[in-house]
Amino acid sequence: MNSRHLLAAFAAGLLTTTALPAFAQPYFNRIASFPVDLNTPEIGADVENSSEIIAATEDGMMLVYSNALVGGIGFVDITDPADPQPGGFVMLEGSPTSVTIIGEKALVTVDTTEDFTAPTGYLAIVDLESREVELECDLGGQPDAVARNADGSLIAISMENQRDEDLNDGVIPQLPGGNVTFFDVDAGVVDCDSMRVTDLSGLAEIAGEDAEPEFTDFNGRDELVVTLQENNHIVVLAGRTGEVISHFSAGAVDLENIDATEDGRLSFTESQPGRLREPDAVKWIDDDRFVIANEGDYEGGARGFTIFHKDGTMLYESGPSMEYIAAQLGHYPEARSDAKGVEPEGMEVASFGDDTFIFVNQERASLVAVYRDTGAEPEYVQSLPSGVGPEGAVAIPSRNLFVTANETDLSPDGLADSHVMIFELGAETPAYPQIMSDLDADGRLIGWAALSGLVADLETPGRLFAVNDSFFSMMPTIYTIDATATPARIVEATPITRDGATAEALDIEGIAHDGQGGFWLASEGRTDRDIPHALLRTNRDGEIIEEIAFPDALLAHEVRFGAEGVTMTGEGDAAIVWIAIQREWGDDPAGHVKLLAYTPATGEWGAVHYPLETTAEGAWNGLSEITAHGETIYLVERDNQIGSRAVLKALYSVPLSQLEPAPLGGGLPVVTKTLVRDFMPDLEALNGYVLDKVEGFAIDAAGEGWVVTDNDGVDDASGETNFFSIGMMN
C-alpha cells in the first residue's frame, strides 16, 4: 500500500472512531477551567503567569503546580472539581521546574542557575498545611523533573544541567553533563544525606559525555526510566541502587505525508526521513512497557509517541497520526509545520477501572490525545481541548478526574491566560469536537482552521458553507459543512482561485449567495499588508469572476478593521449586497459603524449606520457577521476580549425595512436594533474560557440558526472552535 493510501486508510479509521465509537464506554469531558492568575492577583495583569508541572494530593482534593515565571508553586482547591477555587501561592527562591507530592509534603525542584557552566539548584520540601518551606536539599546542579515511587519511599530527580542554546547555536556537548539523583523519603520527609548520584555519561551515541536527562518515571518494581532528550537516548535504572539495567537509542522515524513547511497552507504531502524521536515525557504503562512523547528539541522531533519494552524493543510507533487527528479537528498548528508540528510533550498514564489510558499533551495543537492501552496498538478514544500549551498532566482515578496545566500565558497581550483544566470521566458522548473534517472525494485529509464567515445552503437543511480568513493566505477556501452530523462535518473544501491559480492577497471574512449559483465574498483589507478592501464574486467552483473595489469616498477614511460579513437582499436589479464593517472608520461618529450597501445592477454604493453597544474599558466592540433572513437582518456584535474579560458576544436584529442606504460622504441614517441572543452562555457551555471571535452566523433552509467561532489558526490561540445551533429562528 503506498503512502497516500496509508494516509487515507488511517484517516478513515479516525473518522469512524470519532463518529461511531467502537467502545460503549464513558468519555472525558471538561468540567472546569481555572485561570492561575487568581492565585497571584498582586503581580498584575501585565506580568506573565504560568502553570507547568502539576500534581495532586493523595486524597485528590488539592492540585499543586509549578510556576517558574513567577517563582513559586500554586494551589487549586478541587473539593468541588466543577468549581475549583484559588488555594494560594508559595514563593520560592529560584525557578521551580517540577513538583510531586508525598503525604502532606510537596517536593519541588528549583533551578537557581546563573551560569550554564556552573548550574545550581535545590529540592524544597513544602508543608501542605502550613505552606512553609520546611527543608531544602542542595542538588549540586540544575534539576528538571522529579518523580516518586509507588509507596513514597523514594524519589528521583533528573539533573539536566541544560545547555546554553545561545552558545555555538546550542550545539552539544556543553559540560557539565547531567545525572539522576536519588533520595530516600520517610513519611514525606526527605533525607538530604541519603542523596545518591548516578552518572549517565558515556551511554548515548550523541554527545555521550554531556547527558541531558529530561523526564523520569518509576514502575511498580522501583525501576526508573529516564529520557535523555538531546542525546536521543533512554536509560532504565534500578531505583534502589542506581544501577543501569538497560539503555538504548530512542531511534528515528521516517515521517511521510506531513506538513513540513510554514507556507500559509495545510498540505500533508511532505516527508522527513530519519527524524530523531528526541523524547520529552515518559510514563510506564506497566512494569515492562513505557511510552515516550517525541517532542524533539535539538535536531529532531518525531511528532508522535512510541511504546517500548524496557529491554529496548520498540512495540508501537504512532508516526504522524496525531497530526492527522489535529488537522481533522482544526487544531493543526501550521505556523509550526517547519519545526515540530503538534509537539507532543507532557504525558500521563493511568488506570480508570479496567481501562488504562495514555494521555499525550500536544503543546502546539493545544490538545490532549487520549488512547486506550490494549497491550498492542493503542486505540484512539478522543481528543481533549486544553487551553494554550498543555505542559503538565495528572490523573486522579479515585475521583474519575484528569487535569492539565497549560503553561502559556498570553494575557499581557490581551489574549488567553494560563489555565488549569479539569476533565471528568463519565459522559456518554464527548462534548468536543463540535465540528471536524471528513476526507475529500479523493480520500485526502481536509485540513482546516480559522473559519470566519458562514452562509446556509438555500435548499438543504443543515448544509452550510464557511470560509477561512487570511491566516491561510495560500489556501483561501470555501468549506461545505454537514451540520446534521454529530459532530458537524466539513465534507468538502473548494479552493478560491483567480485565473486558475490560488487567489492571493485576500482576507475572506464573509460569504453570501449571489443569486446566480455562486457566492459573494467580503475581503477585509490591510493596506499595510497589500491586501485591498474588496467585494468578490465567485462561481460555485470558487473561481473569482468579479472583483469590486471599495469606492474612493469610503477608502479616504480607511482604518485597519474593515469588512467582516456580507449578505444579499432582494433579487435581480433590486438586489443589494450588504457588507458589515467591523469598527468605526475615520468619518464615523463614535460608537457607530457602517453597513455598506452595493447595488450590482447600477454599481452604486451607500450605507446606513449601526449603533454599537457601549465599550468596556480597555476593549473595543465591533461587528463580525451580517445575515439576511426574511424581513430581518441579523448581526453578530462582539468585544475583542477573551476569558473572564469578555462581556459582549451577541446576536442582534434590525428590520429590513430600516435598511434604506444614503450616499457615502454625507449623513447616514441610524438603524435600531434588538437583542436576539446573548452568546455568552453558549460559549461557556464547554467549561473552558470564553473564546474571542464569534465570526459566523447562518440560518439554514429549515430556519435553524448556526454559529461558528474563528480559532485564529491555532497561533497564539487554543485552537478550539465552537460550532453550535441556537435553534429555530422566528
Image: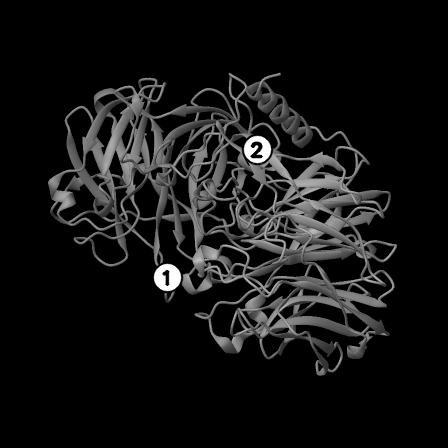
Q: Which residue is mark 1?
A: 619
**Which one is nearer the viewer's eye here, 587 or 543?**
543
**Which one is nearer the viewer's eye here, 250 or 306?**
250
Instruction: Describe residue 169's horizontal placement relative to residue 356 as left or right.
Output: left
SS of the residue under disc 2: helix
Q: Amino acid at mark 1?
A: Ala
Q: Earlier in the sequence, mark 2 or mark 1?
A: 2
Q: Residue at x 62, y 40 (%)?
A: 304
Any part of residue 348 in sight: no
Q: How many marks?
A: 2
Q: Residue at x 32, y 19 (%)?
A: 539
Q: Position of residue 8 (x, y in %)?
A: 58, 22
Q: Answer yes or no: do the residues labelled 2 and 1 have beta carbons within 8 Å?
A: no
Work out how far the residue at label 2 is from the one at label 1, CA to CA, in angstroms: 37 Å
Crowd band around label 2 with a 10 angstrom C-alpha radius: few (<14), some (14–19), many (20+):
many
Mark number, residue 156: none
Q: Which of the 4 quarters of the picture holds residue 657?
A: top left
Instruction: Describe residue 165's horizontal placement relative to residue 595 as left or right.
Output: right
Crowd band around label 1 with a 10 angstrom C-alpha radius: few (<14), some (14–19), many (20+):
few
**Which one is nearer the viewer's eye here, 484 or 710?**
710
Q: Position of residue 717 (x, y in %)?
A: 48, 50
- Give the number of the mark in front: 2 or 1: 2
Q: Which of the 4 quarters of the picture holds residue 713?
A: top left
Q: Amino acid at mark 2?
A: Tyr
Q: Position of residue 302 (x, y in %)?
A: 58, 40
318 to 351, vertically: above or below: above
Quadrant of the rendering where the N terminus is positioned: top right
SS of the residue under disc 1: loop
Q: Position of residue 530 (x, y in %)?
A: 22, 41
Q: Which residue is mark 2?
A: 324
